[in-house]
Image (cartoon, rainbow, N blue to C red):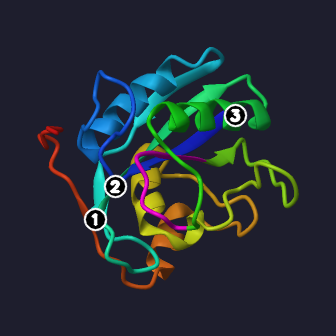
Amino acid sequence: MQVLIAIGANLPRSLGTDVMGASPLATCEAAVQALREIPGLSVERVSAWYESEAIPASSQPPYVNGVAFGRSFLSPETLLERLHAIEADYGRVRGELNAARTLDLDLIDADGEVRRDGSPVLPHPRAHERAFVLLPLRDVEPDWKHPTLGVTVQELIDRLEPQSIRRLPADAVALP
């Protein structure tokens, strides 16, 4: 099945030794490599990286976000478990909703499957409201249609309220 995985971070990595204290950009790039190491998942495309303000607005540092497009034979439940395990490896502590985080991996879509109950809810219930998901999603899958709304990613982008987001240059350096 085709999968879209959102990647984001706004805090330095707090666990491990290879990129401990790494910038959010370095963490996101390392997370892509971790995704590539999941048996049963093939990452085919990764978007550009974007920097955005937290939603809802807060005093948190800006986020770095991107989207990976891949193919998987894992069930959505198993894939989400693997995503959560990577988050934990990168120091993610689940707690307060919309809290700052070292890494956030969200399953946005899994072959257009629609699930309103259980975990994961598909498509991701807030993806269509977030520029930090839609702009990088358009980079990797420009013809994507929202499974329940039936509109293209570009139409969703056109409907967004203004949000603070900028595409990082391709030569952005992921230093700690």
Query: Which SS class for mark 1?
Result: loop
Q: Is residue 142 visible?
A: yes
Q: Which residue is mark 3?
A: 81
The amino acid beneath tag 3 is Glu
- Using the image, determine if residue 139 lies above or below residue 38: below
Residue 10 is marked as 2
Q: Are marks 1 and 3 in contact (CB under 8 Å)?
A: no
Tell me which segment is drawn in magenta: 98-106
User: Depth check: 176 or 52 in front?
Assistant: 176
Mark closest to the chain's N terminus, 1 or 3: 1
Q: Are marks 2 and 1 in contact (CB under 8 Å)?
A: yes
Residue 120 pos. (x, y %): 76, 49
Q: Crowding at label 2, few (<14), some or many (≥20) Cα neighbours within 10 Å?
A: many
Mark closest to the chain's N terminus, 3 or 2: 2
Compute the Cα span from label 3 to label 2: 22 Å
Q: Which residue is mark 1?
A: 61
Residue 12 is marked as none
- Using the image, determine if residue 139 lies above or below residue 28: below
Residue 47 pos. (x, y %): 37, 43
Q: At 61% across and 68% down in the image, what residue appears? A: 126
Compute the Cα span from label 2 to label 1: 6 Å
Query: Which SS class for mark 3?
Result: helix
Farthest bottom residue in view: 161
Does the magenta portion include 132?
Answer: no
